[in-house]
Image (tube, helix red, strand yellow):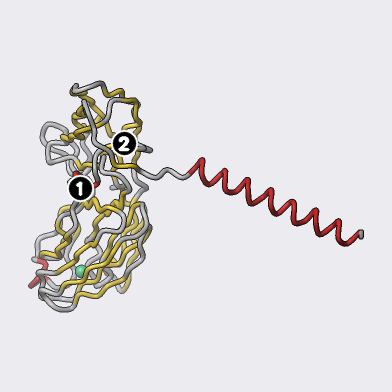
Amino acid sequence: MFIHERLSLRAFLFLCLGVFGLLFYNSTARAYTEKDVTGGGTIEGTVKWAGAIPEVSFFPIQKDIEVCGKEPKLSPRLIISNDGGVKNTVLYLANIQEGKKMAELPSTLTLDQVECQYEPHIYIVPVGAEFVMTTSDDTLHNIHMYGAANYNLAFPVKGQKIAKKLRKAGVVDVVCDAGHYWMSAEVHVVEHPYYTVTDKDGKFKLENVPPGTYKLTAWHEGWKEKEKKEKEGKIDKIMFSDPVIIEKEVKVTENAVLTVELEISDK
Ligand SMILES: [Cu+2]
């Protein structure tokens, strides 16, 4: 009888745990729902650099000069226009629950490797979409992903193509381990279509946003060299600072255009 009671108590506790877990899961699950947006507004603006413009980093070429070129590569990690606009900043509405269709996302699904650089540098890919990678270079590259995806793919042949589905939302850092330590790209695997990337003037636009209050988020990859690893007198790997994230509450009203200015600095 005693044992039976104890087992029942244990079973009861497990049941409670299960119910609690289910409730907790439901309250934290944030699935995005597509709907027809009526009276959608626009959020547009500029991401600007605040303060003195840092010195531009150049990376010396140590390998495959005939393909990569002999000129040092300009760092793609921080590009500021003459007017102070910051290129390649990812803007998104955090935690948006419903709105326009995923098909309206201006996604970037094709990566190329051109003269030992990833082209383009920033990618927005819907969860589960096929990401197509290719190379225009007649040398060995690899695409090594860290973060929300962990593929490590060799590209020894010019024109070769590999497509992979990116199934987990989040940020993927891409680097090449084939002696091209300067090669890097950033992939955002996303669950909703309210994402965009700033152009060369730091400008961005998010359209067809249902009226409401949102957390506009600006994400910029780290650009400061934190650590440099060398092997046999050559640069092997450079570690960069963490991404910079800026959040701002925005209120979108029916059919209106909201202009937002955001600032990124060296601090
Ligand atoms: Cu490479």
Residue 260 is situated, as x and y percent measured from the top left of the image, at: 23, 25
Residue 81 is situated, as x and y percent measured from the top left of the image, at: 12, 37
Helix, strand or loop for disc 2: strand
Comparing 170 with 20, the one in front is 20
Q: Which residue is mark 2?
A: 93
- Disc 1 Cβ-to-ligand 1 distance below 8 Å: no
The image shows residue 48, relative to residue 136, as above or below, that is above
Gap in angstroms between the C-alphas marked 2 and 1 = 17 Å
Image position of 51 (left or right of 80)? right
Ligand 1's image quarter is: bottom left
- Which of discs 2 and 1 lies nearer the camera? The answer is 1
The image shows residue 214, relative to residue 32, as above or below, that is above
* Quadrant of residue 20 within the rendered picture: top right
Q: Amino acid at mark 1?
A: Ala
Q: Amino acid at mark 2?
A: Leu
Residue 71 is situated, as x and y percent measured from the top left of the image, at: 9, 61
- Whether residue 266 appears in this view of the structure is no
Q: Which mark is residue 15?
A: none
The image shows residue 199, relative to residue 142, as above or below, that is above
Estimate how packed mark 1 is, as few (under 14), some (14 to 19) or many (20 or more) residues with alpha carbons within 10 Å. Answer: few
Q: Which mark is residue 103?
A: 1
Please identify the residue farthest to the right as the structure is shown.
1
- Identify which residue is drawn at 30% across, 44% down: 192
The image shows residue 224, relative to residue 230, as above or below, that is above
- Identify which residue is drawn at 19% across, 21% down: 256
